[in-house]
Amino acid sequence: MRKTPTKTATPNAWRAGLQRGGIELRHLLRNGKEMSSHLTNVVVALLVAAYVSDDVPGTRTPMAHLVLAGFAAYLLFQTGLINLPQTLVAEREEGALLRLRATPGGIPAYLVAKCVLVVVVAVGTLALLLAAAALLVDGPLPHGPGDWLTLLWVTTLGLLAVVPLGAAIGAVLPNPREALALVMLPTMGLLVTSGTVFPITSLPVPVQQVAAVFPLKWMAQGLRSALLPDTARTAEAAGSWELPMVALVLTAWAVLGFLLAVPLLRRAARRESGSRLSARHRKAEQSGALPA
């Protein structure tokens, strides 16, 4: 009697998660405000690239191409590690996790749905950025099948590295009002120190070593290898693209994220109760965050 749910829980969770992800994606596409925020990121990247005119030091690669490759990595990183935690915290405040407690396989299905949503949004934003950059500012594109394959696996591994981690962070953040500041400040620091907007070799060695611990540096390096000519590798810290290390670091972060995400979401769901939800709503109403 007890073995039947165990055998069917995983397929049911995947099916429910894919269905929920499709529904959330349709809602997103109909939400002009949220769609405009993603488009704004692409516009900012194009404007920055349009005003950069120098070459990468020691190469003939336009600095604008390095900036666009870095922004492409940051957009993937932002979608998983900034947008997703904010969404999870907001939905927790609305009682989503409380409802999942009464749903068999609710947490895995919820995580699958969020992965579907984030992956589609991130890949769509990346494709839009690369296409718009190629048309408007002579931006970089992969030069052959090998580069397209590198772009594919770096994007996939990069999202696997940050989406579960973003879910884990969203499970422990206190509330939506603090979530943005707590997540945005560290990620902006990584944007500056990970070689996404200028060559990483221009930074002090200790800063490079700290950045190398986090996935953004390796996501940006992997995308540069796919989008920039091979001669641009001389501007990398090791003088090469280090693609095996890119794969290793991103895989390690993906494993860590998955090991953290499900138990932390389950813990957050267990801690939810009707009284906690009501107390949060009363506090939000008193602070003016919600209408009374």
Image: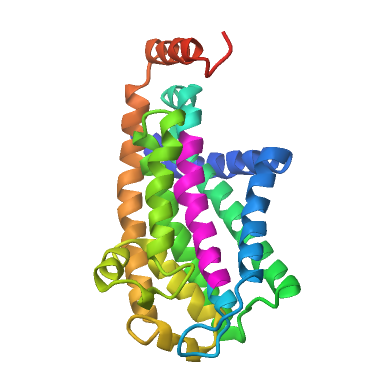
Asked whether residue 11 is in view, the answer is: no
Q: Is residue 161 above or below residue 149?
A: above
Residue placed at 50% from the left, 77% from the top?
224
Q: Is residue 80 magenta?
A: yes
Q: Is residue 13 above or below residue 251?
A: above
Q: Main secondary structure of the magenta part?
A: helix
Residue 45's quadrant in the figure?
A: bottom right
Q: Nearer the viewer, residue 16 or 172?
A: 172
Question: Relative to 171, is 143 on the left or the right?
Answer: right
Q: Which residues are magenta?
A: 67-88
Residue 120, percent across and down? Answer: 61, 54
Q: Nearer the viewer, residue 51 or 241?
A: 51
Residue 67's quadrant in the figure?
A: bottom right
Residue placed at 49% from the left, 43% from the top?
84
Q: Is residue 95 magenta?
A: no
Asked whether residue 151 is in view, the answer is: yes
